[in-house]
Image (cartoon, rainbow, N blue to C red):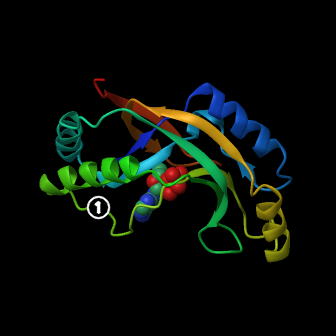
Amino acid sequence: MIRAFFALTLPDTALDQIERLQAAIPFGRAAPAENLHLTLAFLGEVSPETLEAAHEAAETLAPPPFALELRGLVHLGRQPGGVIASGVVPEPRLDGLAKSLRSRLAGTGIQLPRERFRPHVTLIRLRQDDADDATLARILGRHADFRAGPIPVTGLSLFRSYLGGDSARHEELARYSFDP
Ligand code: 3AM
């Protein structure tokens, strides 16, 4: 089985802005630049046949190119633990892209996790004893004005995720470019 997900990748300018922010947060494990992405749809563990069906579904997407901006920080998951992620300035074309992708995947019979789409970029992974509530709230507040972008969305990628060790390793299996 193959653990896979669809995501947007980030340009170097945004990666640099993120790296500076990560360096300013004194706890947790910073996600390495090659792992930074915005997940559109998590497939879970799928067979090679299902992966191929997902690949074919993604090839039919043709949204107009648009741009995103990251804004602010949020804590996701249960505290203690969870992750610090950046939020995304609301963008209907991003929601539309995630919806089209997910409905095409569902059309091939792929069962996706039920959670609604909550755009974010995971920046820091927290261990249980990394930060108490007050420390976390202080850090989120201190960096509330964090911005990164613009992030041109000219395509999306299919990633394989290898778990194990301290952080997952991601391998880009395919890239789908949107024609202008
Ligand atoms: O790094 P982010 O948060 O964008 O959270 C996981 C990660 O996204 C998400 O898939 C991405 C690659 O691992 N993910 C992992 N397990 C998940 C699940 N059961 C999940 N998303 C939804 N349901």
Residue in the foreground of this view, choosing between 68 and 60: 68
Q: Residue 90: image x %, image y %?
A: 49, 55
The amino acid on which the numbered mark 1 sits, given as a three-letter code, is: Leu
**Residue 176 against residue 164 in the figure, above or below:** above
Q: Residue 4: image x %, image y %?
A: 37, 46
Q: Is residue 1 at all visible to an observer of this figure? A: no
Q: Residue 138: image x %, image y %?
A: 84, 67
Task: Tell me which residue sits at (57%, 39%) in the image.
Answer: 35
Residue in the foreground of this view, choosing between 101 and 151: 151
**Could you say which quadrant of the image residue 11 lies in?**
top right
**Residue 165 against residue 116 in the figure, above or below:** above
For this orientation, the residue located farthest to the top is 180
**Could you say which quadrant of the image residue 62 lies in?**
top left
Q: Which structural element holds mark 1?
A: loop
In the image: residue 61, left or right of residue 4? left
**Label 1 crowd bin: few (<14), some (14–19), many (20+), radius 10 Å:** some
User: Badge 1 is on which residue?
Assistant: 112
Task: Tell me which residue sits at (24%, 39%) in the image.
Answer: 58
In the image: residue 88, left or right of residue 75? left
